[in-house]
Amino acid sequence: MNPSENSASIEKRSREIRLAALDMISASGASHIGSVFSTAEILATLYDDILNVRPAEPDWPDRDRFVMSKGHAAAGLYATLSLSGFFPQQRLKEFYVDGGSLPGHVTHHGIPGIEVSTGSLGHGLALAVGLAAGARRSGAKWHVYVLLSDGECDEGSTWEAALLASAWTLSGLTAIVDYNKIQSLGRVDEVVPLEPFADKWRSFGWQVDEVDGHSVDSLRHRIDPTLWPSAGGPRCVIAHTIKGKGVSFMENDLLWHYRCPVGDEYDRAVAELEAEE
Amino acid sequence: MRTTFVEGLSELAEENPNILLVTGDLGFGVLADFHERFPDQFLNVGVAEQNLSSVAAGLALSGHIVFTYSIGNFPTLRCLEQIRNDICYHQANVNIVSVGGGLAYGALGMSHHATEDIAILRVLPEMMVVAPGDPVETRKLLPQIVAHDGPTYLRLGRAGETPIVSPEATVKLGELTTVRSGSDLLLLTTGGMLPVAVGVADQLGQEGVSVQVASVHTLSPLDEPMILSMVEAVPIVITCEEHSIYGGLGGCVAEVIAESGLNPTFRRLGLPGRFAEGVGSQEYLRAHNEIGHEALLGLARSLHAQATGFEAKTMRS
């Protein structure tokens, strides 16, 4: 497969993730569809192109570790894992319903392919630092990737971990920030502005790159650690994204951090996502 | 206890290179020898206890046996959610060590008094809570903690505690240690209150009162069968701890007794739901807050007198 063909298949996978998550969230009345849609290309790129994992052998010791720090976008991760073959797609019906097995925030209990449980913001980067330090100490070759939300960059614990990752020159760690610019109660630049965001990470000792988080071609080249300069230390990819990306009436609207599409909204969302193909 | 802990951990670390000691920038003069001997097994994350706990979880999930080290409430209360979510829920092999449990840091003040930690840590699922009574228990429990695959909270005193438990005694994680045998009264202690209880027991012994003393070094899981069997055999039970009477040893034992159908005379000696008052050494604060030797002696004497007086009166009628 040539690179452009591969990008096309990842783009297709992104649409499948959005459609699967739309079904899961609509059927169960869950929240956070906007947060899921902003991550679709990132998750698809990671699982289709970057992560060295084996769906048939989820506990393979040499697998790369992925930490979904923004645990509220769980529907997107479950959909991605299922589409990647970690568990049957039928199981996605078990999301956020009575008697289900896939809770609204990421859990590793009983779900193949999930490394750690999250849901409270500000934990994931520190967990990833521990994993990356542990890998280096053990002489293991696996890499650690962590996906953060912009909102959780309000948490002091995120920056505690950022300080330590560079102090320990953790080259085996790549953080990706889903910078969709909308957090729980408003726009990031109105609640607690993060700018100059890239400079903050740089000043904490990280190598930083910024990317269009919906461009699969760009994501593939910017996330892949082998394509970075070999200078030691952790890397941060700031992915500029759009909350609710893919469905016009959800894009850039705080409402869709909470609202679950019902009736006509669901039909219109499906139509728009399918029209992208 | 802290010196015993570091010496014991050094022996274990020598045998097992997967043991890591991770400090939150504390342990001056205490950890230097470990750091020098095992530079690859020593990490300092800086003054950042939330990070300490989550990083420890990540290290444990990549195959290490991790000891986090700090003092007082810093490695527990500051980072409680990291302990609950990242360590306990993942059943990570992280052992949280706090030096200075109770009022050990005396005159340093409220911020350094750990007097609610047992209650808070013991309700966490998967968490084992251990407060050794003396350096002997500390030394004997440490290899068992290393062998236990899961989270532990190890609450230690500071330094210079008198050994109480015989070096030949069997000390098992999850089982209380009987330190004195007796039939009139049972003193259950945890952590550094053991010498106080033994001092009171010996003094009462000279007065003809037979006192049983047990060190409940493991508070979660609690040695319920042994506690009930001991409670059943005596008319009076007193718990003593350098901790709130709510949720700590007194709370644990009260729960067990309440569900057992037994009805001993039962009292909890500890801080009655308030911060320790006064400024001074551990010894001073124990006395000032009425949880030290004199307070325990007075309480035990008074309950024994009431019980024997009641018995005498009943026999006369």
Image (cartoon, coloured by chain):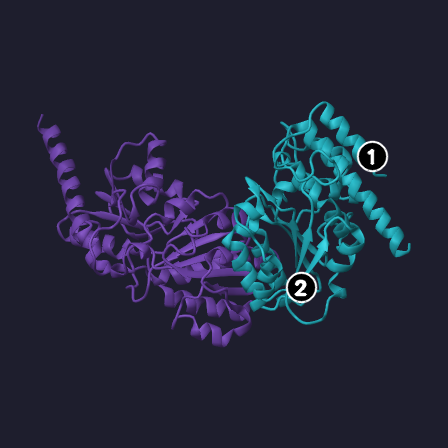
Chain colours: A cyan, B purple
Q: Secondary structure at mark 2?
A: loop
Residue B305 in picture, x, y percent from top left = 13, 40
Relative horizontal placement of residue A146, taking residue A52 as reference (left or right): left
- Counting labels gives 2
Relative horizontal placement of residue A16, taking residue B63 as reference (left or right): right
The type of residue carrying mark 2 is: Gly
Q: What is the residue that sits farthest to the top in this orientation?
A: A263
Name the mark nearer the viewer: 1 or 2.
1
Q: Which residue is mark 1?
A: A274
Look at the image and tell me whether residue B17 can be seen: no
Residue A134 in picture, x, y percent from top left = 61, 62
The chain that hosts pointer 2 is A
Q: Which sits in the foreground, B73 or B122?
A: B73
Q: Which residue is mark 2?
A: A172
At horizontal 22% and vertical 61% (from top left) the residue drawn is B281
Q: Earlier in the sequence, mark 1 or mark 2?
A: 2
* Residue B173 tag number: none
Q: What is the residue that sits farthest to the left in this orientation?
A: B316
The chain that hosts pointer 1 is A
